[in-house]
Image (cartoon, grey):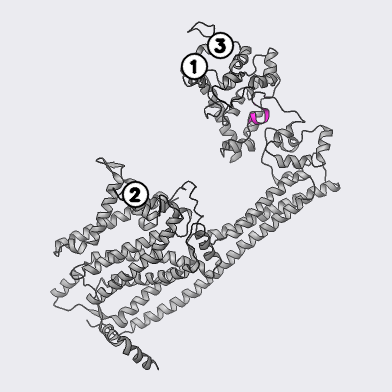
């Protein structure tokens, strides 16, 4: 019976070639192989986001009058609604962490090199999209903290000369954060971003399959010196089972986090109330939030916030164009490692300072 | 904490205020630059007329109020500065204990400048004014809290300190509620005089209207009138008005009913039943609050429970107010409604705790399944063919 179904499908989809290719696909096996799993882990969490997000959509209402109440209904009345919402929130955070780990591992292992420039480019864009998912999703419960954090977050764009106010108005759907902002960010969160992300994920996966996993230069050099080939493991079943092992651990962690630390709903946003103390963005934006706090109002007569935003934008652009900016020598690779390490240390320190400032 | 803080804060303000006032008076010309009269274009001669420039002296104390009244009782003149300004202060002052004594020749009593200052006078709504809500009790206390000043006049100097220990002082000084009653709210300002036994309930009723209405409709009203008791003050005191507590209701020692009621008779049974209902309601509210807090600490949402608890607290307030009917009903209905709401809140808290337990059990089972799956996977991975070296 299964043979007939397979034959029927194969005749129409030509899956035999794909299965045959996967059977022969191998993954390099060396001391840094563990970092390969973060890509799959991010993809797994993305899948969880899509699944739980679709379930939340069944009850969520994107308006200032109903958003908070609908989330409250989800977590109190809908069977397992609390679990779905908590998993969606926790999974979003783990996905950002996993994507960041994946990006920096690719950077430190120099996997962005030719011919994988487009893989890197699509990966960085996917990370930025992940952050955009986080930013747009943060406001959706319409609670006090998210309301004021979104007001602060969108206001940062106002520092951009000439078009800053226009960007802010575009993001907010008006001059201030209102129900129009909620509807707009909801649209981005469930339609625009998923559409773009799905395309980019497909492209990213296609490129990964096309080029295979990158072997770090140090591993390749040592293998060349030893005149030996680099060990490889079959993708099926060796790598896939290990991937599955990692995903199962993530699933267990998500279940435990959602049960023991269910995501808080907070109090409903009141646009006319003064901003409460301790307003802060999600942890992955804390470093930028803290940096802006330390920037002086003016540097050499120029708006300090504008300079900080410009430096961060330049950093993001440099990261995006890294394969085209970095040379192919060992020396330039060392510069990339040092620059990446410095950026990581800076973000970690700033995040630590921000957390210390809000710690009770 | 509150009871220690409030009198402390009041006494600190009390200690510091005279220094500020004397500093104001140290240089009249400098103080006058910030005076509301100076900003209205008046100069020294407005008050010191017929005195040689540079050698001004203070007017005699009995002449101060009439001097101020020359402008402040002139509606046509005062309207030039403020269309809604009052001009009855002097008339009221003449009816006050201060004004009557002053007229009788006792010059140590307060006149306009003692409360408002002489030079550097500010509007009452200005927070720097000695008679602004946060300062007025301290201003009164400068005289009324000073035994050396009060004893020769046959007055008690305890009221300011008593007020500082009151629930009203806590509202003003701790919560910053400037609508909380100070000396002037009950005694009047320009017409300041102690309210009499028959009028003190009207004073309290300005804010505590519901309690006053219930009391007046109760049998206690006629009894208190007949024996000459000052209604509210009998149970609540006058200046040292402490937060009312449920244990005040009762016939045991220390309860406010005890001086008139003993443990026998119908009234004792009614009092006992009220106390029991109040205690049951307070216990229910406390237990529900603890249960809901426990669930919230564990991350559960218990909004409906909180709503029920709020209803229970509202009924608790209602029941405490209805004590002033001195009757079993409608007090009993409010207390029963409150107890029922507290029960619903407690049920919500306990249901949330049970739900939490179910979740944790579910997680435990899920974790076991996941661990079993992980072990299976691990075994499978270990059994895979060795990678070629």
Q: Which chain carries label 1?
A: B
Q: Of the numbered discs in the image, which one, if any, rests on residue B26? A: 1
Residue at horizontal 62%, vertical 14%?
A: B66
Front of the two marks 2 and 1? 2
Give the residue displayed 74% in from the left and 46% down from the top: B322
- Cβ–Cβ under 8 Å for marks 2 and 1: no
Do the residues bearing badges 2 and 3 touch, measured as CB atoms within 8 Å?
no
Point out residue A205 in the picture as x, y percentages from the top left corner: 29, 74
Q: Answer yes or no: are tags 2 and 3 on the same subunit.
A: no
**Left or right side of A136 for B62:** right
Residue B42, label in figure: none
Q: Which mark identifies residue B58?
A: 3
Q: What stretch is highlighted in magenta?
A: B182-192
Which residue is tagged 2? Answer: A165
Q: Describe the element under mark 1 as helix, strand or loop.
A: helix
Q: Does the magenta stretch include residue B185?
A: yes
**Rounded to the nearest whole Å, what is the CA distance between mark 2 and mark 1?**
55 Å
Q: Where is residue B17 in the image (x, y as percent from the top left)?
A: 54, 25
Residue A62 point in image, percent of width and height = 47, 61
Dot 3 falls on which chain? B
Q: Based on the displayed image, in which of its 4 quarters is residue B284 positioned?
A: bottom right
Q: Does the magenta stretch include residue B256?
A: no
Image quadrant of residue B346?
A: bottom right
In front here: A232 or B179? B179
Q: Earlier in the sequence, mark 3 or mark 1?
A: 1
Residue B291 seen from this side: no
């Amino acid at each position: 019976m299964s043979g007939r179904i397979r034959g029927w499908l194969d005749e129409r989809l030509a899956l035999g070639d794909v299965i045959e290719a996967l059977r022969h696909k191998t993954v390099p096996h060396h001391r840094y192989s563990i970092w390969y799993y973060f890509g799959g882990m991010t993809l797994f969490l993305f899948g969880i986001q899509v699944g739980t997000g679709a379930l939340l959509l069944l009850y969520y209402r994107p308006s200032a009058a109903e958003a908070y109440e609908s989330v409250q209904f989800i977590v109190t009345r809908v069977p397992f609604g609390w679990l779905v919402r908590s998993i969606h929130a926790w999974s979003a955070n783990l996905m950002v962490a996993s994507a960041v780990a994946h990006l920096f591992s690719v950077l430190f292992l120099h996997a962005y090199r030719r011919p994988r420039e487009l893989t890197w480019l699509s990966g960085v864009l996917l990370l930025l999209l992940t952050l955009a998912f986080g930013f747009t999703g943060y406001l959706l419960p319409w609670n006090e903290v998210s309301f004021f954090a979104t007001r602060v977050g969108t206001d940062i764009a106002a520092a951009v000369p000439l078009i800053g106010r226009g960007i802010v108005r575009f993001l907010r759907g008006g001059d201030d954060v209102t129900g129009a902002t909620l509807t707009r960010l909801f649209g981005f969160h469930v339609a625009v971003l998923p559409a773009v992300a799905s395309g980019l994920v497909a492209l990213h996966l296609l490129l990964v399959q096309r080029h295979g996993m990158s072997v770090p230069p140090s591993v390749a050099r040592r293998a060349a010196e030893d005149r030996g080939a680099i060990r490889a493991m079959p993708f099926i079943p060796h790598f896939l089972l290990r991937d599955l092992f990692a995903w199962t651990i993530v699933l267990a962690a998500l279940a435990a986090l959602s049960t023991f630390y269910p995501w808080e709903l907070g109090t409903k946003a009141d646009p006319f109330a003064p901003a409460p103390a301790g307003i802060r963005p999600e942890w992955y934006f804390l470093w930028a939030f803290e940096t802006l706090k330390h920037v002086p109002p003016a540097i050499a007569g120029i708006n300090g916030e504008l300079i900080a935003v410009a430096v961060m934008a330049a950093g993001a652009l440099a990261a995006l164009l890294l394969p085209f900016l970095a040379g192919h020598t060992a020396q330039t690779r060392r510069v990339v490692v040092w620059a990446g390490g410095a950026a990581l240390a800076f973000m970690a320190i700033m995040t630590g300072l921000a957390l210390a400032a809000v710690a009770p | 904490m509150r009871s220690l803080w409030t009198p402390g804060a009041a006494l600190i303000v009390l200690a510091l205020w005279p220094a500020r006032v004397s500093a104001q008076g140290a240089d009249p010309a400098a103080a006058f630059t910030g005076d509301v009269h100076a900003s209205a274009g008046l100069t020294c001669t407005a008050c010191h007329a017929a005195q040689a420039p540079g050698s001004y002296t203070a007017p005699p104390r009995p002449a101060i109020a009439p001097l101020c009244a020359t402008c402040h009782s002139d509606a046509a003149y005062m309207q030039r500065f403020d269309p809604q300004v009052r001009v009855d202060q002097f008339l009221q002052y003449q009816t006050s204990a201060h004004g009557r004594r002053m007229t009788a020749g006792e010059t140590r009593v307060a006149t306009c400048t003692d409360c408002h200052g002489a030079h550097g006078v500010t509007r009452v709504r200005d927070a720097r004014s000695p008679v602004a809500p946060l300062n007025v009790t301290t201003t009164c206390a400068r005289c009324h809290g000073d035994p050396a000043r009060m004893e020769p006049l046959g007055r008690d100097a305890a009221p300011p300190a008593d007020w500082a220990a009151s629930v009203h002082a806590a509202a003003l000084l701790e919560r910053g509620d400037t609508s909380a009653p100070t000396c002037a709210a009950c005694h009047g300002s320009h017409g300041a005089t102690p309210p009499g036994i028959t009028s003190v309930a009207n004073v309290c009723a300005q804010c505590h209207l519901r309690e006053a209405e219930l009391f007046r409709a109760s049998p206690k009203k006629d009894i208190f009138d007949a024996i000459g008791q000052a209604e509210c003050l009998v149970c609540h005191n006058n200046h040292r008005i402490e937060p009312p507590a449920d244990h005040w209701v009762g016939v045991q020692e220390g309860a406010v009913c005890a001086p008139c009621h003993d443990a026998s008779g119908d009234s004792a049974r009614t009092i006992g039943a009220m106390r029991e209902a109040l205690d049951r309601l307070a216990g229910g509210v406390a237990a529900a609050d603890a249960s809901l807090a426990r669930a919230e600490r564990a991350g559960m949402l218990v909004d409906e429970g909180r709503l029920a608890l709020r209803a229970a607290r509202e009924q608790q307030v209602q029941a405490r107010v209805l004590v002033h009917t001195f009757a079993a009903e409608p007090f009993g209905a409010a207390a029963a409604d409150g107890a029922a709401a507290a029960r619903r809140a407690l049920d919500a808290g306990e249901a949330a705790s049970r739900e939490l337990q179910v979740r944790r059990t579910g997680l435990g089972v899920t974790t076991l399944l996941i661990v079993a799956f992980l072990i299976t996977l691990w075994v499978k991975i270990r059994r895979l063919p060795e990678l070629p070296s």
